[in-house]
Amino acid sequence: MTTLILPAVAKLNLFLHITGRRPDGYHNLQTLFQLLDTGDTLSFRLRDDKQIHLACNNPDLVNEQNLVLRAARLLQAHSNCLQGCDIYLDKQLPMGGGLGGGSSDAATTLLGLNKLWRLNLSLDTLAELGLSLGADIPLFVRGYTAFAEGVGEKLRPIELEQKTYLIVTPDCHISTQQVFQHPDLIRNSSQIHYQELLTTAWRNDCQPLVERLYPIVAITLQWLVEYAPCQMTGTGASVFAAFPDQTSAQHALKQLPPSCRGFIAKGVNQSPVWAALADTE
């Protein structure tokens, strides 16, 4: 095998509760990660030398800070791999939207190159490598919808009804760092137990602050709530609502404000990346 094409799907935070701030500055949180069936696509081609090259349909994303490049180089160094790769990233997910696109791209890179380079590293090892790059990456490495604690790395799989979601991203880029460092961020939510997940009222502790700092997010939520109950995912800017079927979601999408972009996706309990990897066996 010399080439590999894999998906890198998005996620939603069905709720996000912040339960405290740690001495290292990070926050303890509880969240329910819902994986979606839609996202970016990465193509990998084996090289006989150690060179790693990245290309993308958005040239602005080709830089040394791109998580795809960082993940590839981290894996190569960890495994002392003598091979390289050419990577093409077909970027479809909005950036800075709270959908985990960059983290998912990095996770797919770790999974794909582990396969292409025949490294046979365990999922635990890949998740640990991913965590050193970003808190959401272990979720996408393990590839299942999950209840998460800690900084988001302590994962417990959960089976959820596979709903149809409309995801809408207003035209703004939100700084996650600014949100988590802001003095007005809610940081004292009570912890909930796993058994209470499906009976607890869900909310996003970041949403009130983000609505105040970025009024366009509040305006977008006011538009979407006319069609279905909605909330923000992560630190935004994307917001989402569940619909009973594709037709009703499509009706709302057709009324999308000109300041927004949107797409429809299905919730899944296992990432499509696993089916794609199985097809290469």
Image: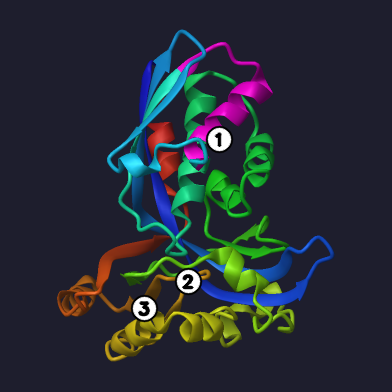
Q: Name the residue type under label 2.
A: Thr
Task: Report x, y in % for residue 223.
Answer: 29, 87
User: Which residue in the protein does label 3 denote?
Assistant: 241
- The reply to whether residue 203 is in sight is no
Determine which quarter of the picture holds residue 60. top left
- Between the residue at mark 3 and the residue at mark 2, the CA separation in whole angstroms equals 10 Å
Label 2 sits on a secondary structure element that is loop
Q: Main secondary structure of the magenta part?
A: helix
User: Which residue in the protein does label 1 denote?
Assistant: 70
| Magenta-drawn stretch contains 70 | yes
Q: Residue at x 81, y 67 (%)?
A: 22
Tag nearer the camera, 3 or 1 = 1
Q: Name the residue type under label 1.
A: Arg
Q: Earlier in the sequence, mark 3 or mark 2?
A: 2
For the N terminus, which image quadrant?
Answer: top left
Which of these two is toward me, 14 or 168? Answer: 168
Judged from this view, the residue extending furthest toward the top is 48
Left or right placement of residue 133 versus residue 259 in this view: right
